Amino acid sequence: MKKINIKNVAEEYYIGKIVCVGRNYTDHVIELGNEVPEKPILFLKPSSAVIFSGENIKYPSYSKEMHHEAELVLLIGEELSNADETESGKAIAGYAVGLDMTLRDIQNELKKKGHPWTIAKCFDTSAVLSDFVSSKEYKLTLDEQISLSVNGELRQREKLNQMIFSPSQLVQYISSIMKLERGDIIFTGTPAGVGKVNKGDVLRADIKGVGELTCKVE
């Protein structure tokens, strides 16, 4: 089990399941030619996919188009099932910035065939995390800006308040589908600006007040 680092918190958390949200920023939906969803679109990643800031992303040999997706990540602090929005907000124990690395060529090929696109999302090192900040120590306003640069070139920048579904709404919806448990983490979706990365690229993602991460593609 992989331990989660939370700044200035002695409590220990270990990563459980990773729930990811797709198409949660309108501009990103448009750039990929998809429809704006009426409900959150969910998929899962295994905890084995996680690496932390400073570690390297490994480019799978079976893909030629890996994309970066910078996201706000939520840490669940307690068991939750069929919760209301208030309970859902209180269950968020911390925040981080993360990268949901995606094999876009593989994903597009599988979508055309009507197949699940698990292998485009769940490969080793496909989930990158910064340290978490406790929700007791930092109050998220959604006025925060998320950004990502590749080799110093800005690729993604957007305010969190542009999410279609807010963090508490996402937690509420997910808890209606599956039980959430202490240590589960939620990737909340990425804004517009996703793009291809190459071996040797250095990625830096940041949410002011929440966290930052840096990693290299190998």
Image: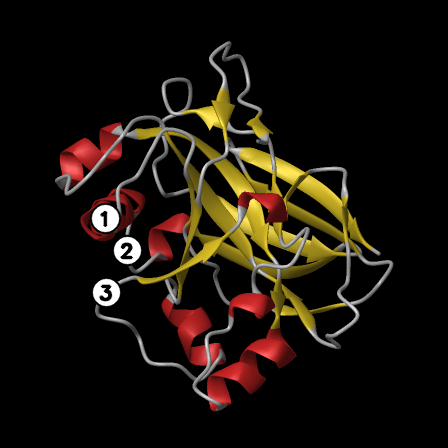
Residue extending farthest to the bottom is 112
Q: Nearer the viewer, residue 49 or 169?
A: 49
- Judge by depth and name the residue closer to the eye, 179 or 73: 179
- Badge 3 marks a residue whose secondary structure is loop
Q: Which three-letter amino acid code belongs to the residue tagged 2?
A: Phe
x 45%, y 34%: residue: 95
Does any portion of residue 193 appear in the rendered image?
A: no
Whole-number angstrom distance, CA of label 2 to CA of label 1: 6 Å
205 and 77: which is toward the camera? 77
Q: Of the residues shown, which amino acid type is indicated by label 3?
A: Lys
Q: Label 3 near label 2: C-beta < 8 Å?
A: no
Q: Position of residue 64 (x, y in %)?
A: 75, 77
Question: 18 left or right of 172?
Answer: right
Give the colour scheme of this rendering: secondary structure
Q: Inspect the image, locate mark 1, and give the three-letter code of the amino acid beneath it.
A: Gln
Residue receiving disc 2: 165
- Residues marked 2 and 1 touching at CB (< 8 Å): yes
Q: In the displayed image of the protein, which residue is found farthest to the top?
A: 10
Mark 2 or 3 closer to N-term? Answer: 3
- Residue 67 rendering spot, x and y as whole percentages: 65, 67
Is 88 situated left or right of 151 in this image? left
Q: Which corner quadrant of the image does residue 66 belong to?
A: bottom right
- Name the residue beneath numbered marker 3: 39
Q: Quadrant of residue 156?
A: bottom right
Left/right placement of residue 72 relative to residue 85 reads: right
Q: Residue shown at 57%/31% (left/top)?
A: 1
Label 2 neighbour load within 10 Å: few <14, some 14-19, many 20+: many
Lower position in the chain sequence, tag 3 or tag 1:
3
The CA span between labels 2 and 3 is: 8 Å
Q: Residue at x 44, y 56 (%)?
A: 44
- Residue matched to label 1: 169
